[in-house]
Image: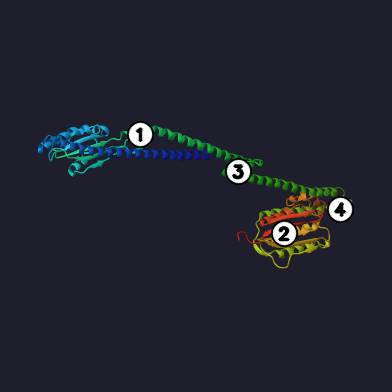
Amino acid sequence: MRLSSIRARVALLSAFFALVLVGSVTVATYVFVARGMDAAAEDTANRLLSAAERVIVRLTLQAEAGADRAGLTGAEAESFIGEELMVTLPEVLSQGLIHEGSYALYVIERPGDEPVLKWSGGDDADEGRAEIRDEVFSSGVMQHDHPLGRPILRGLVVSADLGTHVSYIPVDVPGTHAAVLDVIYMPAREEAVLNAMRLPMILVTVLALGAALLLTSLLLRWALSLIENIKVAADSIDVGQLDVHLPEQGDNEIAELARSLNRLIDNLRRRNEAQTRFVADASHELATPVAGIRGYVNILRAWGLEDEGLREEAITAIDRESRRMARLCSDLLSVIRSEEMVDYRSIRYDINGVCREVLASAATRYMAKGFEFVAPDEAPLWLYGDPDRIAEALGILVDNACKYTPAAGIISVTTRRRRDRVIVQVSDNGVGIPTEDLPNVFERFYRSDVSRSQETGGFGLGLAIAKHIVDASGGEISVESALGQGTTFEIALPRRKAGA
């Protein structure tokens, strides 16, 4: 798999985001739990502090009561109380809940002396900091300290270390200048919880990351399989095979894309078939007059010099067939020109005036057939478009009507408004079009049996040209006909400019 491929890039990007997402959740969870454990440790340290203060008060009162019972006063009472505290305080602090902490008692015997450690309990009694203790000696105000251990996130790799909670309590011990009790709590239980959850969290993280990568891989494989189908379809189209069909199952973006591409392929197939038919029909139509011309040329070569009548007949036939070829070439050029859509204008013009001009031209050409031409109203009916192109389309429809209508027939062109459109109808009372031929009359080179039986000299291109002109003008064209009763073509054109 190439690193420049979409598969590789999406896989790497998915792995990165999965790692970031799962890793972020894991780290956030661990930090949240670690903060909770640290808060729990601080709460325990505060409870130890409160308990130690109560113990000091209770033992001092008991020692004073003992001195009273012994009848001691003055210096003897102070000495007794101090000795009792030195003996009972370590014993009581090592019992019950109090034993969770570590304790150390520092004493200054006389002013100016250095603090001396009188006794300590627990292996952590040296966790206190001398500078803070000295400040408590001088101020007599209790202080707290929380020296931090390793950073919290390192607990994901090595053993957790939440630091140490230390409280410095000034204690009134008779017989001494000052005393300070260090209350120390090492959060071993809380750290044990964090250490116990480290391995499960790592396992869960690895499993979640693997599941995310697997799911992403499956989704990626599914999406790329659809893209692969599109690639196969594109390759087939490139080599001219238009019989492919992409799967359209599902209601998602890829299925929508597949449906759009299938519509595109169907349109391309229809156009390809139409182009193939167009080339075949054009070749056939051109081959017929060419064959006639070649035949008459051979006749001229064989007998034309001896038979003047035959020579004149051959020359007339050659002229007729050459004119037929010229008309066909002209119609083919009209098809090509109409499809280019390079000269279409959008100007304001009177459609009634255009219709009257088309009818006047037809009346001049078909004067011998004695048609009755019915034109639209004299009042102008304005719309926007290319009057020359519309006149060309109307001329084709009127010319067809004249060709397939018997002498003395009626040819009419009417117009009317319909909401934001102008409707133009070209009607005749001619031979009509069979019902089965109506869906195909706008195809190139299509001629019904009725039109083939007439000696019109047409090639079946006129209606295709007219439809293309109307479509390019933003309009629609339709036909209704009954065999032996006549035909009506209807054109619906927009009245306003596109986007107006």
Name the front one of labels 4 and 3: 3
Dot label at residue 431: none
Please state which amino acid type lies under the numbered disc 2: Glu
At x 21%, y 44%, the residue is 141
Point out the image quarter for the C terminus: bottom right
Q: Earlier in the sequence, mark 3 or mark 2?
A: 3
Residue that carries the numbered disc 3 in the rendered image = 258
Q: Earlier in the sequence, mark 4 or mark 3?
A: 3
Distance of mark 1 from mark 4, alpha carbons? 116 Å
> In the rendered image, is residue 266 in sight?
yes
Q: Nearer the viewer, residue 325 or 446?
A: 446
Q: Earlier in the sequence, mark 1 or mark 4?
A: 1
Q: Are marks 2 and 1 in contact (CB under 8 Å)?
A: no
Q: Nearer the viewer, residue 215 or 119?
A: 119
Dot label at residue 193: 1
Q: Is residue 498 above or below residue 277?
A: below
At x 60%, y 59%, the residue is 499
Callout 1 environment at 10 Å: few (<14), some (14 to 19), or many (20+)?
Answer: some
Q: Secondary structure at mark 2?
A: helix
Residue that carries the numbered disc 4 in the rendered image = 313
Q: Are marks 4 and 3 in contact (CB under 8 Å)?
A: no
Distance of mark 3 from mark 1, alpha carbons? 55 Å
Name the front one of labels 3 and 2: 3
Residue that carries the numbered disc 2 in the rendered image = 392
- Location of residue 204 in the rendering, given as x and y in whole percent from the top left corner: 43, 34
Callout 2 environment at 10 Å: few (<14), some (14 to 19), or many (20+)?
Answer: some
Distance of mark 4 from mark 3, alpha carbons? 62 Å
- Location of residue 280 in the rendering, given as x and y in whole percent from the top left corner: 74, 46
Q: Secondary structure at mark 1?
A: helix
Q: Are marks 3 and 2 in contact (CB under 8 Å)?
A: no
Please state which amino acid type lies under the numbered disc 4: Glu
- Location of residue 263 in the rendering, given as x and y in whole percent from the top left corner: 64, 46
